[in-house]
Image: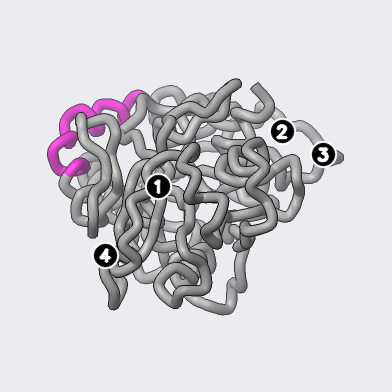
Amino acid sequence: MYLRFLSLCCVCLFLISCAEHKSAPLATAEHFERPPGVLRVCADPNNLPFSNQRGEGFENKIAELLAHDLGERVEYTWWAQRRGFFRNTLKAGLCDVVIGLPSGFEMALTTKPYYRSTYVFLYRKDRGLSVNSLDDPLLKSLKIGVQIVGDDQSNAPPAHALTRRHIVTNVKGYTLYGDYSRENPPARIVDAVENRDVDLAIVWGPLAGYFAKQSRVRLEVVPVSPQIDQPFLPFVFDISMGVRREDQDLRDQLEQILDNRRGEIDQILADYSVPRVDQGKGAGGV
């Protein structure tokens, strides 16, 4: 279960559990009143395709849709999604909803999932590769990019799965944190594929799908198989919205909007090339 939780954290690039100081005090049950007429969203100002300060991410678009149906306006609390994100935003009462979280995330009250996505293999189409399984013997000879946190116990699922298969010396790590002075730091792993620094990368689907679509070269986006690597390392995840645990009314309102606006939300995700495994289809070539 610990490994599964670490995987969930890595998936959304929040890394909350493994990034927060273990010595940090436990959150209190203090109640924060939501200001009238405002949907306060906790978000990263530099993290496409999810969000940025210019409102260009798919979570920005979904936030606007939520606010419209609530009869409110969106107001952001911007914080880089790394160490201290939850403690300094949602838990501090500065904002009231996080648009993308793993379903069942223990530091928040989550809605029902509004999409399910997957890790993907990402490689240049002109390489002529056809890799869709972690057990493909070709992985032993390719230079592979994976995203890492820097602590062996908190790496994303691809690093753990490759290590278990003794695929180590040909793996290159790209930090999830990245250089925050550049736009969208987690996207450097996609740049590495595009620039031939690696032959192939294993990347969280929404990140790969969006930047593959923007790429100047044709990139293949192929869902990772198996979806759950044994003994229990998932590569597909349900994604929800999260509020403070005491904000059940807001959670219920958000779930109603998710039901009412299912078509519009699905279209937003499609516009951003988010690979879906909850609609009977995965990602294809981009």
The residue carrying mark 4 is 213
Residue shown at 71% from the left, 30% from the top: 28
Q: Around disc 3, counting alpha carbons within 10 Å, would you say few (fewer than 14), some (14 to 19), or many (20 or more)?
A: few
Mark 4 or mark 2: name the one nearer the start of the chain. 2
SS for dot 3: loop
Left or right: 271 in relation to 23: left
Q: Is residue 119 above or below residue 189?
A: above
The residue carrying mark 2 is 27
Q: Amino acid at mark 4?
A: Lys
Please state the horizontal and vertical placement of residue 15, each as a whole percent of the image: 62, 45
**Residue extent of the magenta highlight:** 252-266
Q: Amino acid at mark 2?
A: Ala
Mark 4 or mark 1: name the one nearer the start of the chain. 1
The residue carrying mark 1 is 120
Structural distance between the alpha carbons of marks 2 and 1: 35 Å
Which is the main secondary structure of the residues drawn in magenta? helix
- In-front residue for pair 99/3: 3
SS for dot 1: strand
**The N terminus sits in image quarter:** top right
Structural distance between the alpha carbons of marks 4 and 1: 14 Å
Please state the horizontal and vertical placement of residue 226, each as a whole percent of the image: 43, 31
- In-front residue for pair 279/100: 279
Residue shown at 15% from the left, 43% from the top: 264
Judge depth for marks 2 and 1 and give the one in front.
Answer: 1
Q: Amino acid at mark 3?
A: Lys
Structural distance between the alpha carbons of marks 4 and 3: 39 Å
Q: Is residue 267 above or below residue 48?
A: above
Residue shown at 62% from the left, 62% from the top: 172
Judge depth for marks 4 and 3 and give the one in front.
Answer: 4
Mark seen at residue 22: 3
Q: Around disc 1, counting alpha carbons within 10 Å, would you say few (fewer than 14), some (14 to 19), or many (20 or more)?
A: many
